[in-house]
Amino acid sequence: MVNEFEQLSYQSGFGNEFATSDPRVPDALPVGQNSPQVCAHGLYAEQLSGSAFTAPRHQNRRSWLYRIRPSVIHRPFSPIDLPHLTSDFSKGEITPNQYRWNPHPIPQGKNVDFVEGLYSVCGGGDVVSRVGLAIHNYACNVSMKNKAFYDSDGDLLIVPQQGTLEITTEFGRINVASQEIVVIPHGIRFSVGVNGPSRGYILEVYGTHFVLPDLGPIGANGLANPRDFLTPVAWFEEKDEPFQIVNKYQGKLFVAQQDHSPFDVVAWHGNYAPYKYDLRNFNVINTVSFDHCDPSIFTVLTAPSTKVGTAIADFVIFPPRWGVADHTFRLPYYHRNCMSEYMGLIVGCYEAKEGGFRPGGASLHSMMTPHGPDVKGFEKGSTEPMTPQRVAEGTMSFMFESSFNMAISPWAVKENVDTDYYKDWQSLKKHFKMP
Ligand SMILES: O=C(O)Cc1cc(O)ccc1O
Ligand SMILES: [Fe+2]
């Protein structure tokens, strides 16, 4: 059977003014205006604002959707309980300890969809004043059926670790495999299809959007190149069936019923839309002389705060590359950071951790919490020959780095924790010799 998701076409570019109509209705977009008195084919026009109307032009984000019915046709929301989802980390545990989690368990013996499988791990800041972040895991084994989800709290950057996500959005359909990421901006409705056990990580940021980092002296090209970001083309279904619209609003979940699919956008235009990116397209830039560059050199996307150069969250990856530094300890240095560092592993093995850190697992080194290579890593880094070597071959790990102090959710603080993690460093030997 043909899998339509694997054959989807996309529009390329980051933050473009896109314009797209479902090929079945090629003339659905109005020409020369956004709100015609009567839209083509009896469609309704609806604007989705992703920034304040008056945000400066370079930060202004909005799209116009031409849909079969406006989103406003739904019955009232009522609360639903999802015991492992929160944005209120004040009830979580405050601990400066180094944390490592074993691979997040995938549900077995019961059907769990993407929304039901959301699991908040840690976070900081606040959804009401709209600055901060939350880090979640997801684990699921069935597709969302006649169910759409939208997040009123922030943008979602989703990192599938296992299983391909077939995501239907209001803006079209996106296929996201392991080693790719997808960003679903604030408020956009989507439904996740899976083909089996699926697991991954989610970075949610409040009150800002992900942008590409400035390149400074690197020049006009490099790191994640804009044309490798892929946004769906318009696609709609005309499905008059009961649908559940699940909304995360101020960290709580609500559901509203309606009698039609929300994926009824026949055409849209604008610069506010979901997109995907294949991490293997990242153009790695690094030292060709000596010393270990700060990991910011591997930034794919950043969600800026109002403090210059200090992100609410950066999304950083550690892709396969060459290590060529001379007379250098090439592994990540021992570190204490005024930022919080959450790391995940998509595939393979992370260079600074020979064991313990497994695909689907994670670590958290909170603000000013010391971290660095384990004993084996230190020995390798101190003795390896200084010849050019492939680093991280066959692996992909990442970091969500935040200027926010984070607390751990009441469940993640005790569930699935590798309580022996601190032992990784205990047998680092004293090598100092008094001259
Ligand atoms: O391994 C880590 O925790 C992340 C990290 C990577 C790096 O290249 C330098 C410092 C650092 O903390
Ligand atoms: Fe660090």
Image (cartoon, rainbow, N blue to C red):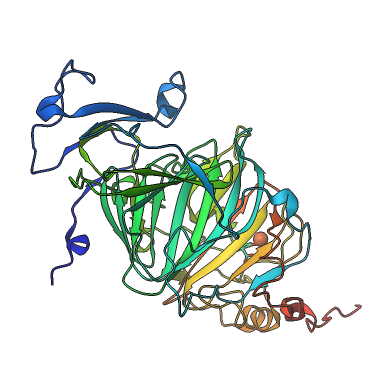
Give whichever of 345, 375 is nearer the camera: 345
Q: Quadrant of the N terminus?
A: bottom left
Q: Is residue 196 visible?
A: yes
Give whichever of 157, 263 is nearer the camera: 263
With 231 as the anchor, is 206 left or right in this view?
right
* Res 386 → quadrant: bottom right
Please say if 133 is above or below 298.
above
* Res 33 → quadrant: top left
Residue 172 percent location from the top left of the image: 25, 47
* Res 306 → quadrant: top right
Give whichever of 386, 120 is nearer the camera: 120
Residue 258 percent location from the top left of the image: 33, 42
Q: Quadrant of the C terminus?
A: bottom right
With 175 as the anchor, is 422 left or right in this view?
right
Residue 291 percent location from the top left of the image: 61, 63
> What residue lies at 62% left-to-right and 70% top-to-bottom?
328
Residue 257 percent location from the top left of the image: 38, 44
Q: Is residue 225 visible?
A: no
> What residue lies at 35% left-to-right and 45% top-to-bottom?
274
Locate ligand 2 by image quadrant.
Answer: bottom right
Give whichever of 415, 62 is nearer the camera: 415
Q: What is the residue that sits farthest to the top in this orientation?
A: 37
Count the marks.
0
> What residue lies at 60% left-to-right and 60% top-to-bottom?
84
Please say if 185 is above or below 108.
above
